[in-house]
Image (cartoon, rainbow, N blue to C red):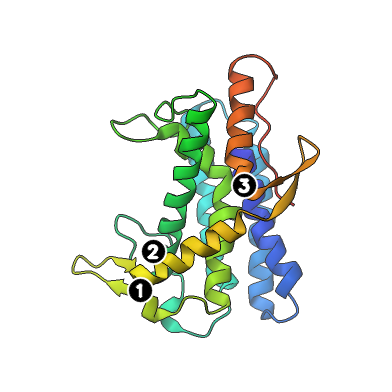
Amino acid sequence: MLQGKIHNQRTVLSRALRDHGATLPENAKQALSDAANRLLRVSDRLWHATSVDELRGLEGDAARLYFNVFDKLIRVECPDLRFQGRSRRPPKDPVNALLSFLYTLVTHDCRGALETVGLDPAVGFLHRDRPGRPSLALDLLEGFRPMLADRLAVSLINRRQLTTKDFRSLENGGVVLEDDARKTVLAAYQERKQDEILHPFLGEKVQLGLLPYVQALLLARHLRGDIDGYPPFLWK
């Protein structure tokens, strides 16, 4: 699962360099390239981890590398839409509010997919079990964060489908999406789920919206001994 997540984080950065490298400042290109290379080294270290806690530590290292350069992906010139680092419970700025909302949507899809294939969404591997927490759904979510949430968040901002007026500050210092903005995000998310992509393990095209179900099915097959390992979805 973590190999899939870090691979897909690298793909987000690599795609930004491929699609917009010509217009990015040189320091931004260098930062994205360096982060992608360092993520690859973290990914290699996963194979040598000897405990779940060590895996969690490496995942944290990867997250810091990734989010340290995430602001380089945002191309709009608006100080209020800059990304200064990941914050949650509550999110402290518009970008974090958008990411948290999208993560919630994908988690819901992962939870439904696990239930469909007969797995308990509350019993996870990476996320510790807590009452009311869908730990396995959060585990499954990890590989989908970059492609289904992070990439869409950046697109919505860069295409100016969302602006500062679409967010509201709360008394506790948190930031949330306005109701109309939530509808905009939901519509964009549903549209994104209609896109087709070649699944590298299955060798056939599937809609993005079906990926949580496909990966949940592969996980169930592994847990039941039908396949030797869990093949993460590797975005290219």
- The residue that mark 3 highlights is 6
What secondary structure is marked by label 2? helix
Residue 93 seen in this snapshot: no
Query: Mark 2 highlights which residue?
Result: 97
Q: CA distance from mark 3 to mark 1?
A: 29 Å
Specify few, some or many for label 3: CA neighbours under 10 Å numbering under 14, 14-19, or 20 or more: many
Q: Which residue is located at x 49 percent, y 48 percent?
A: 106
Kind of residue at badge 3? Ile
| 49 shown above or below 197 | above
Q: Position of residue 213 (x, y in %)?
A: 59, 36
Residue 76 in view, yes or no:
yes
Q: Quadrant of residue 4?
A: top right
Category of crowding for the residue at label 1, using alpha-carbon neighbours closer than 10 angstroms: few (below 14), some (14–19), many (at least 20): many
Residue under pointer 1: 167
Residue 194 found in image quarter = bottom right
10 Å crowding of disc 2: few (<14), some (14-19), many (20+):
many
Amino acid type, callout 1: Phe
Marks 2 & 1, CB-CB < 8 Å contact: yes
Q: Residue at x 69, y 79 (%)?
A: 26
88 to 108, vertically: above or below: below
